[in-house]
Image (spheres, rainbow, N blue to C red):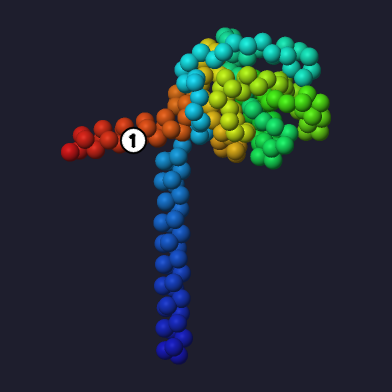
Amino acid sequence: MNFVIASEILLWIAVIALGLLCLALARQIGVLHERLAPAGALTLKQALKVGDPAPVLALTGLDGREVRIGGLREGRAQLLLFLSPNCPVCESLLPAIRSAQGAERDWLDVVLASDGEPQAHRQFVQAKGLTRFPYVLSEPLGRTFGVAKLPYAVLIDEQGRLAASGLVNTREHLESLFVAKEHRVGTLQDYLQQRDRVTASTGDGRG
């Protein structure tokens, strides 16, 4: 009988310890989430900086219609998503792009961009149901925004200025560009530098 009571006590102690451990892990996850957001997706080296005027270009889409990049847009921002038919990560991001087009339609226009053989891209557009999006092929456009890896997104604000840019491997990366625009933080690096400055100034004040 004493053995049963002792084992039951030990079991309850283990359950309580496990519960406390779960609470501690949940708290740490919350802390990490606060440290990482809001921030634009990781950006690569490029000539344009956040706040710079984006180049104004008139390109021809796959459907033959003119697609205007940059410039004043009467209260509407523009998201350029650089992708490739041969990029699995790009394909996995398409549902998020469709969702963003619907959820942010009051202020955002989405343009898909790439380069290469037009026929391959036309097949990609038909196979993935992307006919609703303007789709342009322009290698100079990618070079202008420093696109080196895919998928890559560029957000141009209503005034025609670069608001945010970076690699967008997940839905969260894509949404972080919208948050970055709202908080005027263009890249992950900018956010980390801003956070470090605030932390340093707070520490100096305490000292």
Q: Is residue 33 left or right of residue 99?
A: left
- Image position, residue 125 (x, y; %): 78, 28
- Image position, residue 50 (x, y; %): 47, 21
Q: Is residue 115 left or right of residue 42?
A: right
Residue at the extreme bottom of the image, as rendered: 1
**Residue count near mark 1 (Cα–Cα under 10 Å), binned few <14, some 14–19, many ≥20:** few
- Image position, residue 203 (x, y; %): 24, 38
**Quadrant where the N terminus is found in the figure:** bottom left
Q: Is residue 122 visible?
A: no
Q: Residue at x 20, y 38 (%)?
A: 206
Q: Residue at x 72, y 37 (%)?
A: 86
Judging depth in this view, the residue of 5 and 30 nearest the camera is 30
**Mark 1 = which residue?**
196
> Three-letter amino acid code at disc 1?
Asp
Q: Is residue 121 visible?
A: yes
Q: Is residue 199 above or below residue 30?
A: above
Q: Residue at x 54, y 30 (%)?
A: 166
